[in-house]
Image (cartoon, rainbow, N blue to C red):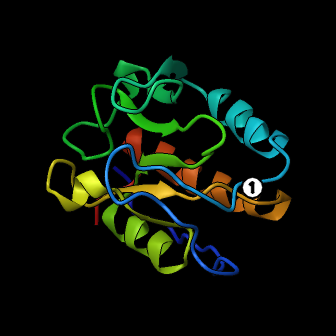
């Protein structure tokens, strides 16, 4: 594993969206008006090297999972929710996602207003580095969400430590 490099994102504008407090953990408002924003992120995410697009093994029907090739997975890390799935996108109209990050990154994303702890992590069934990332509302927010996904991807590959 390499040392964690600087990860900076701006504060998210406005209030946090409404979400459910239990499973299914979904975002209830503040989705983008243009679904193309989400499609662009998904196309980018699923084009990353060693990523397979699969139906999520842990989320609601219709959720699409980012699954890392098993030979590229980090050893003894908490990046994965189940098997080789480290992130998944929720179907429309929700458009949020869940993913794993190093704990410091997860806390930082929450502090900056871009996400919240997964309720299953609050209950102790997942570690506290699994969060919901809110759906981006515009092109500028899409780029921030891509940065968060890139961190999750690096974590899953073992390029970041869980510090």
Which residue is at 31% across, 53% downward? Answer: 22
Please tell me how crowded label 1 is: few (under 14), some (14-19), or many (20+) other residues with Cα within 10 Å.
some
Q: Nearer the viewer, residue 129 or 24?
A: 24
In this picture, is 11 found above or below 24? Answer: below
Secondary structure type for disc 1: helix
Residue 85 coordinates in the image, percent (x, y): 38, 30
Q: Is residue 141 left or right of residue 7?
A: right
In this picture, is 146 found above or below 8? Answer: above
Q: Is residue 56 left or right of residue 29?
A: left
Query: In which quadrant of the rendered image does the C terminus lie?
Result: bottom left
Which residue is at 53% across, 19% downward? Answer: 52
Residue 123 coordinates in the image, percent (x, y): 16, 57
Residue 1 coordinates in the image, percent (x, y): 33, 49
In this picture, is 87 found above or below 46? Answer: below
* Corner quadrant of residue 13: bottom right
Q: Is residue 138 left or right of residue 68?
A: right
Residue 35 coordinates in the image, percent (x, y): 80, 41
Which residue is at 34% across, 56% downward? Answer: 118
Pointer 1 residue: 142
Q: Is residue 55 left or right of residue 77?
A: right
In this picture, is 13 found above or below 99? Answer: below
């Amino acid at each position: 594993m390499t040392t964690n490099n600087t990860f900076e994102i701006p504060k998210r504008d406005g209030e946090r969206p409404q979400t459910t407090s239990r499973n299914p953990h979904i975002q209830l408002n503040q989705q983008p008006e243009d679904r193309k924003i989400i499609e662009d992120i998904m196309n980018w995410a699923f084009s990353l090297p060693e990523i397979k697009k699969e139906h999520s093994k842990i989320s609601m029907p219709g959720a699409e999972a980012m699954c890392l090739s098993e030979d590229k997975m980090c050893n003894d890390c908490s990046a994965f929710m189940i098997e080789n799935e480290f992130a998944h996108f929720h179907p429309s109209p929700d458009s949020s996602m869940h993913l794993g990050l190093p704990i410091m990154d997860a806390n930082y994303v929450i502090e900056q207003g871009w996400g919240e702890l997964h309720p299953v992590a609050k209950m102790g069934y997942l570690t506290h580095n699994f969060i919901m990332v809110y759906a981006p509302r515009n092109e500028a927010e899409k780029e921030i969400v891509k940065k968060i996904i890139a961190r999750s991807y690096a974590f899953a590959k073992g390029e970041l430590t869980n510090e």
